Amino acid sequence: MKLLVCLLVTTIALQAQPPVLLQEDFSSNSDGLWWTGKGDTYSLAVERGKYVMTTQLKDKGRYITISPYIDPKKDFSMEATFVQKSGSQNNGFGLMWGDNANGKYHDFTIATTGYFRVMSPETRTGLNDWIATNTIKPVGQVNLLKIEQRKSRLYFYINSQQVLDVEALPLYGSRLGFITHTDMVLEIDNFVLRHDLKINLPPNLTTGLVKENLGPMVNSPYDDLGPIITADGRTIYFGRENAPDNIGGKNDGEDIYITTSTDGITWSKARNLGPPINNAETNNMAAVSADNNMLMFCRYDGFQIRRRTKDGWSEPEYLNVRFKNEVKTMEANLSADGKAIIFTAKLSQNIYYNAADDVKEKDIYVTLQDEKGKWGAPINLGKQINTAGDELSPFLAADGRTLYFATNGRPGYGGYDIFMSKRVATSWTEWTEPVNLGPEINSHSFDAYYTLSAAADYAIMVSDRNSIGASDLVRIKLPEAIKPDPVVLVMGRTLNAKTKEPLSADILFEDLTTRKEVGEAISDPKTGSYRITLTKGKNYGIRAEAKGYLSINENFELAAVVEYKELNKDLLLVPIVVGESVLLNNVFFQQGRPTLKSESFPELDRLVQIMQDNPTVKIELGGHTDNVGNKEALRILSENRVKAVKDYLVLKGVNKDRIAGKGYGGDIPVVPNTTEANRQRNRRVEFKIVKK
């Protein structure tokens, strides 16, 4: 049974001890905190209220660790009781701490023959030698070992008697636990870790969050990890390690699998994506585009993408992002608008850069795509995000503002915890203070690989607690306190306006106020389906274009949106055929006047682009009004508005001989003028192709 105490207000403990962070009596191991299992020469088990370590080789012991966060600048203590039941008595067992991924650690061990030792990579007086003591009890009796760091010194106790003190030793890593150096049966109990830890939690964080396993249709007896959910929440890509169904069999480090759902609850049987996505090597997928039509993959020094085709997936293309990553691992995420890649790497620009080969700490960076499609140099996200520890698995939510990431460099519940931070305005180097997502998402162990759909109603992540296999995919219903800002998910298909057959189109969306492109997507070449996410509080113009078709433009007014919303909109592209008329959706005039509003310029610039892309095409502009007012005055107004549009096109370089125009007033309504909404539809400008 565990007692976890997270004190956000400093308290005064008895005897000036730090507060209890973790207390364990091994009455159960239901959350899987302590590793159990067997090998050829060892076994580790929780049984009869003890943690039992059994080792069989005289020259090779075993250690077991957990990974709580320890601030090396603060006091801490750890203690446990040990009973050696049998085995060799002259090579020690006890506590270990400061362990890192490279195997550097310290240990405090005793031999039941009456000796103790503090072993460390550091070379100081009193370390690494066996020292005789009469405080140790023999085989079969209980020995209490305690390590206490107090005011930059370490004190070592055996059965409540101090036997040594030294200057505090460096913490190479956060892992701590128990160790044996020889063959024995060892029972461990009454583990207590004390540390004054202040975890920065979100305000108003609710409790009662539950990790729901996605079930045996998705998870396997093997490691299932690295989930990536699509914007619509209906597809999850993930990795599976060393499974027989991998392309290279059990020796294949990782293959990418896929599962789909219609409701986000029941998932299809996960299947291997197969070639060309997977091969017999380790396959590391980083992200899926918001439209679900492009996959991005990590290489240790860059990125590859594959695009969806009618027959599957394209050959990989390298993105022109270059950097010298000093470690062989990295993780990445693609922003919803496709304009930013968030990734982890060890670069010389790391905030706390350490050139030593055994220092693997990564920072989070971003590379941004410019208007010409070129990717810029990596930008470090800064000290507010990056620590002297290791950051990994960054995920930028669909709002383009809320970042989730894992780190072992901040106070938390385990070795790596998941945190949330938000961009300040449009900066990539200014962020809010990261908040820990709390003890129901984070655990005493490793927590990372957190992903959200556009709806952000559930998070998908990896857990090894109560799992089907080694690690499983789980989902958690999110409270408002840790959700990103709401967005709008626009979905539909791009279709031939005449035949209604699907076609592949490029889709661009822009902010109508700033006239800047804010994202892009491609539609599925086979089905025509597309998805884009748009942030709230703005009005957007969306343009779909395909070769041999006139581009189509739609506008979405989202300034008043305050919660997540889904919109369905098919985009009908008109083939370039003489006689076809196309509505200019986003052309606006001042009330009752022929003066163009600036919001019209992006739409007219797109018409200029159509004319430039199709240099033999000639058009006729048609101006239309409703029927409210003097008929002749309405005709003149419509003619003047046509002239204003033509003048703009000519100013932008279109030959005036390619543009005819006529004002029709209210003579050709598209709907009856019976309501204000209908009258608004009848007030329009169209163009008709008169020569192809």
Image (cartoon, grey):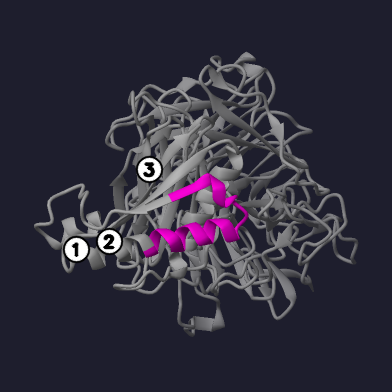
Residue lying furthest left: 674
As shown in the figure, which amino acid type bears the numbered disc 2?
A: Arg
Residue 195 shows up from this direction: yes
Q: Which residue is mark 2?
A: 635
Secondary element at tag 2: helix
> Residue 521 location in percent, x, y?
51, 42
> Residue 181 location in percent, x, y?
74, 41
Residue contact between numbered discs 2 and 1, judged by CB atoms under 8 Å: yes
Residue contact between numbered discs 3 and 1, judged by CB atoms under 8 Å: no
* Residue at image coords 64%, 75%: 75
As shown in the figure, which amino acid type bears the numbered disc 1?
A: Lys
Judged left or right of residue 687, residue 610 is right
- Neighbours of disc 1 within 10 Å: few (<14), some (14-19), many (20+): some
Whole-number angstrom distance, CA of label 3 to CA of label 2: 20 Å
Front residue of this view, candidates 147 and 551: 551
Whole-number angstrom distance, CA of label 3 to CA of label 1: 24 Å
Of marks 3 and 2, which one's residue comes earlier in the chain? 3
Q: Which residue is mark 3?
A: 582
Q: Say if 99 sits above or below 481 in the image.
A: above
Residue lying furthest front: 632
Which of the two marks, 3 or 2, is nearer to us in this view? 2
Q: Say if 490 sits above or below 352 in the image.
A: above
Does the magenta run of residues contain 426?
Answer: no
What's the mark number on residue 409? none
